[in-house]
Image (cartoon, rainbow, N blue to C red):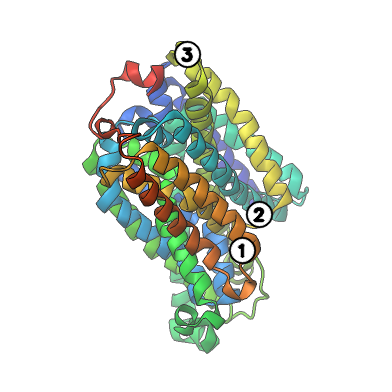
Amino acid sequence: MNLIGIAIILFIAATMWIGVRTYAKIKGQAANYYVAGNAMGVSVIGITLCAQAFDANGSMGNASLVHSAGFWAGAAIPIGLALCLFLTGAVFARPIHRMRLLTLADFYHRRYSTSTETLAALSMLVSNIVLVAGNLAGLGLLLDLVFGVGYLPMLVVIGLCILTYAVTGGLYATITTSVLQVGMFVVSTVIGFAWLTGSIGWETLMARVPDSATALSGLLSREEGALAVWASLVSLALGDVVAIDFIQRVISADSARTARRGCYIAGVLTLGVGLMVSFMGLAAHYFELEQSRFVLVDLALNQMPTLIGGMILLGVIAASMSTAAGVVLDLANVLTRNVVQSHSARDWDDAHLLRLSRWIALPTMAAAVAFAYVRPDPGVLLILAFDIVLAGCFVPLVLGLFWKRANTPAALAAILGGAAARLALYFIVPETWAGLDTLLPPLVSLALFVSVALATQSSSPPKLGALTHVPSEEELVRGH
């Protein structure tokens, strides 16, 4: 076994040790497990919110798309996610934090109904299984590349490792380990980028980049893929607002001000470090690397000094573990809280909620591993994941927060109609118009929401009190 393999094993072991040690912080309370006691500071929130831009979906997908389809195709990932972070800080962090939610799907229950909550939760289930699968796929491929024991065994092993510490310490575990994991990626990427530009030179690196790879036609010409690029930007900038792990970190902040500042810090980090990865994708042309999903790994391990390249590989693995752990945990919590508990007649307490949340994480991870095995496509899966919630859940969230006439029939119509439009357009839109299948469904959802809301004001009055009511901890555990 080489030094990189030993470093990966030690890092994963250290991550599990740190995560498992947070078990004591739960103290048998669901609020600690779900939202880390609403006690996270600004630096922790800022660093951990970057994970999606730096995981296998974001980093490997970014560099691969830049190298194969041009700068804008890959750079859309960090730009879109950074826009989402700035938007969330400016618009959504304060009202969402003020409501004291346990999960994002709680919003759809309080503002609308149990049926709306269930539909939103199921949509989030599909979306986030895809998101976790993309990261597990990247992890499995990378670990197989290093250890050579097979893709499926690596999927199962890393899935079990992540699950072990995530269900032990809940959000405390995923946030604590995320600081280390995301920090590893940031440091390694900055060092790698500095080495490339310092040892070879920026102008020398860019001299071999085809003009077509950086041309503005990538943003302006449909024939050059501009429609797909804009669809990616919109999907990430707006769809990620409805990402459960993303909002869970906003909810866990110690104040609305902390949540907002954390979003802005994360936006700056995402844009700066993410674009460094994009430029690495361009630098791959200098080394005449073949187009591959592993172009970032190839560049790191074969064109950089072993120590720097190994750090970048470890950084990708670390960031991918961060996202996968957070999403699996939050998804299991959504299923427990917003599907099982919402349709249960029994009285719930902390112990029952915690026990079921941990058990439901097992089939959740199993489903993600199965999807990753069938569809190992990091990068593509990131955008697809947010397409799903953008189509149906985004409009009811925005109008539920900022339009007094938003009501339950409108939300139900928007979620169902948006999802149906996304599914139909997947089969209808030709390849030459790829991107319309992402851009049109939220417009369909918006049209349905507004028209149905206006037509049903008398029969279904809006639940405006939901936006100002702050539940006690006992009310939260008992059910919203």
Q: Which residue position is annotated with label 2? A: 142
Q: Secondary structure at mark 2?
A: helix
- What is the number of the mark on residue 297? 1
Q: Amino acid at mark 1?
A: Val
Q: What percent of the width, then of the height, locates residue 52?
A: 47, 52
Q: Quadrant of residue 431?
A: bottom right
Q: CA distance from mark 1 to mark 2?
A: 8 Å
Q: Which residue position is annotated with label 3? A: 351
Q: CA distance from mark 1 to mark 3?
A: 44 Å
Above or below 425: residue 48: above
Q: Crowdedness of circle 2 by 10 Å Cα count: few (<14), some, many (20+)? A: many
Q: Quadrant of residue 384?
A: bottom right
Q: What percent of the width, then of the height, locates residue 437?
A: 55, 63
In this view, the mark in front (1 or 3): 3
Q: Mark 1 vs mark 3: which is more N-terminal?
A: 1
**Residue 273 appearing in the image:** no
Look at 44% across and 83% down and name the residue there.
216
